[in-house]
Image (spheres, rainbow, N blue to C red):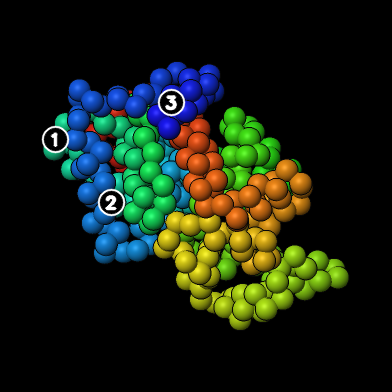
Amino acid sequence: MAFIAALLLLFFSAFSQGNALSLNYYTKTCPDVEHVIAQVVREATSKDKTVPAGLLRMHFHDCFIRGCDGSVLLKSKGGNKAEKDGPPNVSLHAFYVIDSAKKAVETICPGIVSCADILALAARDAVVLTGGPTWDVPKGRKDGRISKASETVQLPAPTFNISQLQQSFSQRGLSMEDLVALSGGHTLGFSHCSSFQNRIHNFNLTHDTDPTLHPSFAARLQSICPIKNKAKNAGATMDPSSTTFDNNYYKLILQKKSLFSSDQALLTIPKTRDLVSKYASSKKAFNTAFINSMIKMSSITGGQEVRKDCRVVN
Ligand code: HEM
C-alpha cells in the first residue's frame, strides 16, 4: 500500500503547486503528531457521532478550492467573506475539533504542523473511527493565506449531472474512477432538505418527483421535507448506517434510494455504473479505490505557510 501511495504521490506532485508531500514528513520534527490528532478526533467522536462526517466533508471542500491548504478553516475578516461562509459551507461543522487538534499539536511541536495536514489526518481518522479502511497520509501541505466565499461556487452541486461532475473532478486532476470512489464518502452523515428538494417537489413539467427515485423513498423524503419546509434542521441521513463507513451507499444507488441527483447520476453512463455495481458487491474493492482516490484528492496542494491559529493567517 505504501508503494502505491508513493507512486500516486510522485504522479500527482505534477498537479500540485510545488509542495512535495511525503509519508515521513514529520518523522523527525513531530513524531507523535498522528497519535495526538487521532486521540483528539477519537474523543470528539465519542461525544458526538456526527463529527467524522463533518471532518471528511470539510477536507473535501478544502481540497476542491485552492487545493488542500486549510483555506476552508479561515474565518471571515473585515471586508473579506471567507470560504467557510460561502453557501455550500454553511452546513460544515466540527471546526472545533481541528482547533483542539491544533492546540494539542502546538504544545508538543510548535510552528511545525500545518492546519491543512491536521485536517487531512483528521479526515483519515474519521474514516478509520467509523469502521472504514486506514492508510498512510502523505504530509507536508502548507496553509494558504486566501479564502473567498465567492470561490465556493466552484464546488460540485448536488444537482449536477454526470458531465458536470466529470468536469468538476477533471479540473482538479481527478478521474471518473475517483468520482465514483470518493462519492462513497456519502456513506456517512446527513443532508438538509435543500440539497435534494429539487428531486421531490416540482421536479419537471411531467413529474412532481424525480422518476429515478424509488417511489416509497421519495414519499418518505417528501414527508420529512414538505414543499414549504420551515424546519431549518430538517433532512435525512445519507444512508441508514450513517455513522458507519461501509459500501451501503452504492447498494442504495442501485435501489434508487440515494439522496442527490449527483449520486444517482453515477448510473447514467456505463463506466461509472459498472463501478457502482462493483463497489456495491465488494467492500474490499471500494476500500482500495477509496484509499487511492483520497490520497490523490488530498495531494492537491496550494499553501505557503504553517499557520499558528487555523482560523487566521499568520
Ligand atoms: C461528487 C460531488 C459531491 C457533491 C455534489 C456533494 C454534495 C453534498 C451535499 C449537498 C451534502 C449535504 C449538505 C447538507 O445539506 O448539509 C453532502 C454531504 C456530505 N458529503 Fe458530499 N458531495 C460530493 C462529494 C463528496 C466527497 C468527495 C466527499 C468525501 C470524500 C463527501 C463527503 C460528504 C459527507 C461526509 C457528507 C455528510 C456531512 C455531514 O453529515 O456533516 N462528499 N455532500
Say which of marks 2 and 3 sits in front: 3
Q: Which residue is mark 1?
A: 108
Residue 13 horizontal side relative to residue 100, left or right: right
Distance between the alpha carbons at the discs numbered 1 and 3: 30 Å
State if disc 3 and disc 2 touch (CB < 8 Å).
no
Q: Is residue 150 visible?
A: no
Residue 276 horizontal side relative to residue 206, left or right: left
Say which of marks 1 and 3 sits in front: 3
Distance between the alpha carbons at the discs numbered 2 and 1: 17 Å
In terms of depth relative to the viewer, which is nearer, 117 or 77?
Answer: 117
> Which quarter of the rendering shows the N terminus?
top left
In the depicted structure, whether residue 271 falls above or below residue 193 = above
Q: Is residue 107 visible?
A: yes
* Percent position of residue 66, x then y: 49, 32
- Which element carries disc 1, helix, strand or loop? helix
> Which quarter of the rendering shows the C terminus?
top left
- Of the numbered discs 1 and 3, the one sitting upstream in the chain is 3
Picture quadrant of residue 118: top left
Tag 1: Cα neighbours inside 10 Å, few (<14), some, or many (≥20)? some
Amino acid under label 2?
A: Val
* Percent position of residue 18, x then y: 45, 18
The residue at the point 81 percent across, 71 percent down is: 207
Disc on res. 45: none
Disc on res. 41: 2
Amino acid under label 1?
A: Ile
- Which element carries disc 3, helix, strand or loop? helix
Q: Which residue is mark 3?
A: 3
- Of the numbered discs 2 and 1, the one sitting upstream in the chain is 2
* Percent position of residue 12, x then y: 52, 24
- Which element carries disc 2, helix, strand or loop? helix
In the depicted structure, whether residue 304 falls above or below residue 154 = above
